[in-house]
């Protein structure tokens, strides 16, 4: 069964246990949509404009692991206060949450990863977590353009192509493969 567990901010109210797979990326890249597509359920709230998700939202995936939807970064319209809060919330999570099994970082396949994406990746790498890149919104590009885009993402981020998977949350393409990839890491630890 796949169920919503809770929304929270700081460490004192995170769900116990853990074994988290956390989905990060710029605002509006489609993290919440991707979670809904991946688990084929309407779990996470999707927004037409950037800045929809504001807390850490935990979902229990068949008792195997917790999927975590988080607010996006690179959202210019956030107030200074919100940016500080967001930074604190993420730092607190990555520094203190035990058992983060995998970070899935979403990028928009149509755009070269931004400086924000590069900074986020470096930040994540500093915690030595396993990282998978998902190039979302693949429905927006032809097959040949998507291949070129994956090359550019790989080069810009310095991540080998076998750690970059194409997806479309809208068309639900590649979801089974990505779920299997995640499950292998969570269950077998590879
Ligand atoms: N064409 C297309 N649109 C998508 C895809 N995934 C998400 N979207 C659209 O992108 C917009 C943002 O989606 P969200 O899932 O709310 O994005 P988010 O990354 O969770 O955004 P924040 O919570 O603000 O950080 C919505 O209008 C979605 O319908 C996709 O694969 N293809
Ligand atoms: Mg969201």
Image (spheres, grey):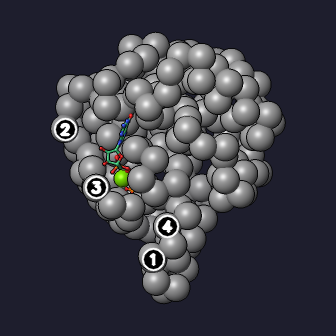
Which of the two discs, 3 and 4, labels the residue nearer the N terminus?
A: 3
Q: Quadrant of the N terminus?
A: top left
Q: Which mark is residue 47?
A: 3
Q: Identify the residue under disc 4.
A: 75
Residue 71 in view in this figure: yes
Q: Position of residue 34 (x, y in %)?
A: 37, 36
Height in image: 180 above or below 164? above
Q: Identify the residue under disc 2.
A: 42
Q: Total of numbered circles in the picture? A: 4
Q: Identify the residue under disc 1.
A: 78
Q: In whole angstroms, how far apart are the C-alphas of marks 1 and 2?
A: 26 Å
**Which residue sits at x=79%, y=34%?**
155
Which of the two discs, 1 and 2, labels the residue nearer the N terminus?
A: 2
Give yes or no for contact between labels 1 and 4 (Cβ–Cβ under 8 Å).
Answer: yes
Give yes or no for contact between labels 3 and 4 (Cβ–Cβ under 8 Å).
Answer: no
Closer to us: 9 or 109: 109
Q: In whole angstroms, how far apart are the C-alphas of marks 1 and 4?
A: 6 Å
């Amino acid at each position: 069964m796949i169920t919503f567990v809770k929304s929270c901010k700081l460490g004192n109210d995170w769900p116990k246990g853990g074994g988290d797979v956390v989905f990060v990326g710029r605002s509006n890249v489609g993290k919440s949509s991707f979670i809904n597509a991946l688990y084929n359920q309407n779990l996470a709230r999707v927004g037409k404009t950037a800045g929809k998700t504001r807390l850490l939202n935990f979902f229990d995936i068949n008792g195997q692991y917790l999927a975590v939807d988080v607010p996006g970064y690179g959202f210019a319209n956030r107030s200074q206060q919100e940016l500080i809060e967001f930074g604190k919330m993420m730092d607190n999570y990555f520094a203190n949450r035990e058992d983060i099994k995998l970070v899935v970082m979403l990028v928009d396949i149509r755009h070269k990863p931004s400086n924000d994406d590069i900074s986020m990746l470096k930040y994540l790498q500093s915690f030595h977590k396993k990282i998978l890149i998902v190039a979302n919104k693949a429905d927006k590009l032809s097959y040949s353009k998507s291949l070129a885009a994956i090359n550019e993402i790989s080069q810009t981020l310095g991540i080998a192509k076998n750690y970059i998977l194409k997806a479309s949350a809208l068309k639900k393409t590649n979801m089974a493969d990505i779920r299997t990839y995640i499950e292998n890491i969570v269950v077998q630890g590879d």
